[in-house]
Image (spheres, rainbow, N blue to C red):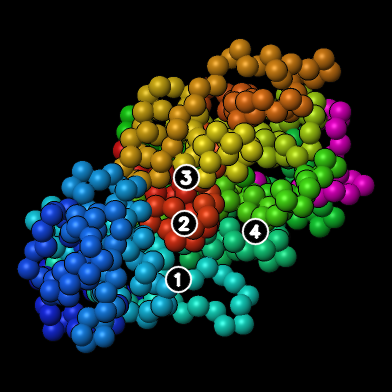
Amino acid sequence: MLPKLAENKQEITAKTLESTAHALLLLPLSKTLPEMPGSAELKAVMKRRDLKIDSLAKSPVALQLPGGTLAVVAMLKADASTFEAHEQVRKALALLMAEHPKSLTLAVFGDAAFKARAADAAVYAALVNAVPLPSRKSKPDAALKSVQLFGHKSADGFARVQALAEGNLLTRSLTVQGPDELTPGVYRKRIKALAKQYGWTVEEFAFDKLKKMGAGAFCAVAQGSPAKDAAIVRISYKGPKGKGSGVRGQGSGKKVAFVGKGICFDTGGHNLKPAKYMQGMHEDMNGSAVVLGILAAASKLKLPVALEGWVALAENHISPQAYRQNEVVTALNGTTIEVVHTDAEGRMVLADTLTLAAKGKPDLIADFATLTGSMHYALGSRMSGVFASSSAIAHQASRAATSSGERIVVFPYPEDYDSSLDSTVADVKQCSMEGEADHILATRFLSRFVGDTPWLHMDLSAHSCKGGLGAVMSDASGFGVAWALALLEG
């Protein structure tokens, strides 16, 4: 549960500041300090450290006030991007959150426009980091219970910020759970519980049903697990009165489908991963968690959108029943696939899931997957790669990235790359053995299963970034939730 949030339009007083244990003070970039509580103490610290005042825009400074308050002061540039503002606020808040406070005071100074923007970034960073992620520590970290903001009062209680924080936290909480905690079967029960909480409807396509339907690509991966608890799950959110999407260029009465890869653990199958690369493979279901986080945020905001979430839940095991190289399987849309590498399982489960999503004739499909190592090599872990079926959709994706602070790079996926997937025994190869441009080849492969549906594919390089990313302090970033909400809102 997120902490209780209180707002006060008046700027913080010296008496109030002295009565709080942990406080963040945010100022507009300047070479001088405004008159504010704690300014004398801050000037003394800056002088002692031989720092210029405007250096607060690069490195926040922590100081102990006479009453015992731990205060952190930071400056934000007026033209800072959303990402830059989130990064600066995260760095400042980290100095306070390291003490695991139960309450936190935020104070913003400057003109009204700056206060509104700084308050938005500060409240989001405070809320999204307020609750410790699930762990099995004998003494878990304490959660932040209350946040008080001075200097700005929102019109709606920061409803959008709170919804984004809730969606992001759900995504990260699911992502970090170990493979013994979040099996496909447990995951399915968790989704049903979330459906009751948010008012979703759920339809499950279990392994046996998918087998009868002819979903050979998904079942090839899932058959290696002895539990046979794999499933493709459809989650529907209708929005108030079942109104359609407000996605820019999509018009009212339209619907959007979000698809997520949900491999709860990935051994690599017969092409077994070495220990270094198998470490962390319980997070290979992050794409599905992003979809659930998006639906949660949209539900919390009661967005007038029609959304469908499709999550492909399975494990990629090594076993006598596991699929093998050189097998040919038939996907749900009739495409025959030559298996080349069993560790390219993500595109297999997504193939049939995208086919199911496309059958519903949505006006846009956006899928999320921790899909290829080559995307990580291309971008590292600070932004994710996106492929779009048209330049108009690519521009929408880029605008959403700028607005949300979740940065992307749009990649091309030209048809001439298809030659690397030519097969002599099937319609298409699953991948190539060379590994060159695999992020593009994976997209070319997946494009065969969306038909003519407008489509966005996100390869989640930034799902985990050591030390945090943007406003988020944990390695698991929840990347994609804020971006998708910005995309929906246009």
Q: Amino acid at mark 2?
A: Gly
* Quarter of the picture holding the N terminus: bottom left
Badge 2 local density, few (<14 within 10 Å), some, or many (20+)? some
Disc 2 or disc 4, which is closer to the eye? 2
Disc 1 or disc 2, which is closer to the eye? 2
Can you identify the residue that label 3 sits on? 382
Which numbered tag is attached to residue 188? 4
Badge 1 local density, few (<14 within 10 Å), some, or many (20+)? some
Q: Earlier in the sequence, mark 1 or mark 3?
A: 1
Can you identify the residue that label 1 sits on? 131
196 versus 426 height, above or below: below
Q: Amino acid at mark 1?
A: Val
Disc 1 or disc 3, which is closer to the eye? 3
Alpha carbon distance from label 3 to label 2: 9 Å
Alpha carbon distance from label 1 to label 2: 15 Å
Q: Earlier in the sequence, mark 4 or mark 1?
A: 1
Q: Earlier in the sequence, mark 2 or mark 4?
A: 4
Residue 371 percent location from the top left of the image:
62, 39
Which numbered tag is attached to residue 397? none
Q: Earlier in the sequence, mark 4 or mark 3?
A: 4
